[in-house]
Image: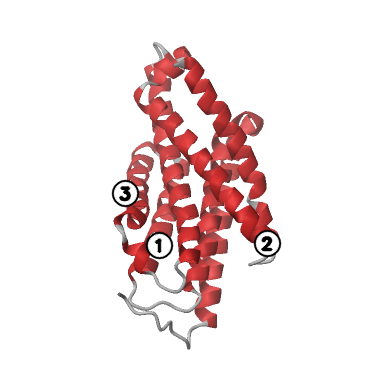
Amino acid sequence: MSYLYQTILMSHILAGALGLILFWVPVTARKGSLNHRRFGAHYRRIMLVTIASGTAMAFAWLFIPVMVKPQLAGQPELTTNLQRFALFLLHLAVQMYASVMMGQWALDTKLSRQSLRSISRVAPSVLLVLTSIMIGIVGILHQHVLMLVFAPLGLALSIGQLRFIFAQQVGPKAWLVEHLAGYIGSGIGAYTAFASFGGRTILSDIGAWQYAFWILPGVIGGIAISRLSRQYSTDNSAKVSTLKPL
């Protein structure tokens, strides 16, 4: 089990580090350019590897914490803290998956949203609603700062996705907002996971200030998504999409 866990951990670290770098290529490249499309696809694939390995680790922390971390034996408080943190990382995994896939699906279905209404494509957004509520409750009960910040952010992202999927009419650039918001949302999750888990050792010396680095990705990303939404809503306020629900 230890060997398997270490393999998953190393895969997660390598994929996550590569994803953090790749994120900026499609973000800074000209929209629609070869680099934007090519590296956007590379980023999406590497994020799926990161999400899968992170989910496996989080489930291990939840259900077999002492088996994968023997040093927790006889320390129930530390074990509980790890399991609580695993819930947060599971929420981030759901947010990253729902975001990166909606970012791609919105692009693929910009002429018709009908295919978005299948169970497989609605499920990630619905699951994100549920995990957001879950970490919100846990955050309130245990005064967990990250959970209190990311619960409303996850709800905002998921509700926006569901509105885009099921709205009778959307603006002509609504697909672009969802495309950009999806990839930005996945970046929020990736950088938050790095700051709160991978970068914990680096940031531990600054005490409570480390919370700022954990929260900043969500705050900055949330502002960026909000501004994009307002920008394209304003640009198209006089123009409504002719797409009808099928």
How far is disc 1 from disc 3 in space, using C-alphas? 14 Å
Position of residue 93 relative to residue 80, above or below, is: below
Foreground disc of the pair 1, 3: 1
CB atoms at circles 2 and 3 under 8 Å apart? no
Secondary-structure class at tag 3: helix
Question: Which residue is the site of mark 2?
Answer: 34
Secondary-structure class at tag 1: helix
Foreground disc of the pair 1, 2: 2
Q: Residue furthest bottom?
A: 238
**Res. 32 image quadrant:** bottom right
Question: Which residue is the site of mark 3?
Answer: 130
- Identity of the residue drawn at 56% across and 75% down: 231
Report x, y in % for residue 41: 58, 53
**Res. 28 image quadrant:** bottom right
Question: Which residue is the site of mark 1?
Answer: 161
Report x, y in % for residue 97: 45, 48
